[in-house]
Amino acid sequence: MKQWTKYKGLAALAMLTLVAPVFVWQYGVSDTVGRWRVTIKLRRQITELQGTHLHGGERHAIPLSATDMISSGLMMTRLVPPIEAEGLRIEHFSRHITTETEGVRLATGQLSVCGTFVGIVKLLRMIECELPECKIIAVRYRSTKPRIRGAEKTLTCTIYIQQITTINRL
């Protein structure tokens, strides 16, 4: 009988205790641990930045108002003059309450405008600068080809705007 056959089980056990953890780490656990570290880092950054935003290099508190500009229509009354001044056309506007929890309401508005790219960019800047209560969360551009031959293409921009307000409960 050969000498190495007596230690075959011991060699298999050693390989199992040394090599198996390396394979498990490499193919199962390392991605999870990496994502967990990134999550912890991002959570730390969020807690540092929570309640503040940069404006001109200085930190200011994000205004949390009691008036819901999106649902009340106040936002649209402030946006209509610049939209008309830039020659834009309102295609669609819808508003709805996204969530209501613990005295806080999240309202979302979807505004679709048609016009020139420069006019749309000026409108986006106006929303960001002059409506600090409302935040743009997404913008989607779409170019539409007209059905009439020789007519110009139009640019449609859909802007998703959100506002966080407090709920006054008596």
Image (cartoon, rainbow, N blue to C red):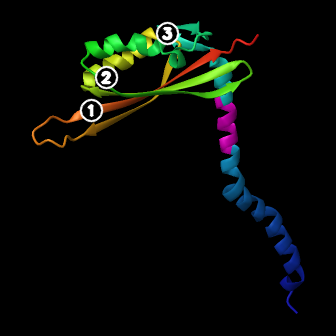
Question: Which element type, helix, strand or loop, lies under badge 1?
Answer: strand
The amino acid at mark 2 is: Ile
* Residue at numbered disc 3: 55
| Marks 1 & 2, CB-CB < 8 Å contact | yes
Query: Which SS does the magenta portion mostly show?
Result: helix
The CA distance from mark 2 to mark 3 is 22 Å
Question: Which corner quadrant of the image does residue 167 belong to?
Answer: top right
Q: Is residue 19 left or right of residue 93?
A: right
Q: Is residue 127 left or right of residue 101?
A: left
* Residue at numbered disc 1: 155
Mark nearer the N terminus (1 vs 2): 2
Q: Is residue 45 left or right of residue 128?
A: right
Q: Position of residue 15 (x, y in %)?
A: 79, 69
Question: Which element type, helix, strand or loop, lies under badge 3?
Answer: strand
Q: Position of residue 88 (x, y in %)?
A: 27, 21
The CA distance from mark 3 to mark 1 is 30 Å
Residue stretch in magenta: 34-42
Q: Residue at x 68, y 21 (%)?
A: 47
Q: Position of residue 125 (x, y in %)?
A: 37, 16
| Marks 3 & 1, CB-CB < 8 Å contact | no
Residue 140 vertical position relative to residue 27 in the rendered view, above or below: above
Q: Residue at x 42, y 16 (%)?
A: 76
| 17 vs 153, nearest the viewer | 153
Mark nearer the N terminus (2 vs 3): 3
